[in-house]
Amino acid sequence: MKKVGIIVIVALLAISGIMAAMAYSNATVWSQADMTIINSNDALVGLYPWADRVGTKDKTVYIDETDGRLYLNFAAGLGDQAGQGTKGFQPGSEYRWGTVFRVYNRSNDNVEITIENDGLKYIYVAEVGYIDHPPTSKFVFVHNGVNTGNRLPIAPGSHRAISIKFDVPADAPLEAISGNLIVKSWAVE
């Protein structure tokens, strides 16, 4: 009788364990969360245009007030408005912008950033003062259109100023080139 009682208890424990495991297969837990969509220059990782200053008076860099994003237009020139671009570069030329935009860290964390090129030819992107350094320099993000993968730290409340250069070879075809520069950041210790 004792054996039967123990077997029944073991069986009941096994069944209750299986039933407990089957009690739910997923759960949804709601927590209050807040966020705000704002202009690029006010974001936690803010992109601030170096607009209407020497080298960018042609609307080369600006924040579009309709979508809050930073735009770069290297085809802009005399008479163009923000978003237009009727000018450009000629083959065999080099164009430089000492400061195009700044990347701000408006969080309480230290962050690292990188800037990646997606589709632009002949472009160099680096922290100001390092545009002519080799791609192995930690301050260079894009070298002749190729992403370096380098990451730079930015302390809370600090920023990095970014310069850009285009070095167009003499045999470059006449064409319109579009792409993206992507700023990525990571919180770090």
Image (cartoon, grey):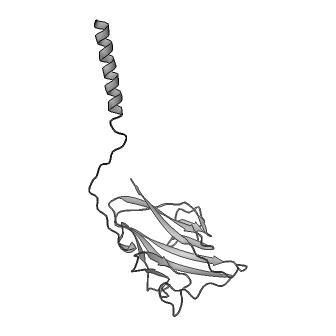
- Residue 102, position as x, y percentages in the image: 43, 73
Q: Nearer the viewer, residue 128 or 11?
A: 11
Outermost residue, right side: 171
Tell me if residue 131 can be seen.
no
Q: For the image shown, how many numbered marks are present on the structure?
A: 0
Say above or below: 63 vs 32.
below
Res. 146 image quadrant = bottom right
- Residue 63, position as x, y percentages in the image: 42, 79
Residue at point 47% right, 66% down? 183
Outermost residue, top side: 1
Quadrant where the image shows the N terminus: top left
Say above or below: 66 vs 144.
below
Say above or below: 93 vs 152.
below
Q: Nearer the viewer, residue 52 or 30?
A: 30
- Residue 112, position as x, y percentages in the image: 44, 60
Q: Nearer the viewer, residue 161 or 35?
A: 35
Residue at point 57% right, 68% down? 118
Residue at point 51% right, 74% down? 163
Q: On the rendered structure, is 188 left or right of 151?
A: left
Res. 141 image quadrant = bottom right
Residue at point 33% right, 45% down? 27
Q: On the rendered structure, is 56 left or right of 172?
A: left
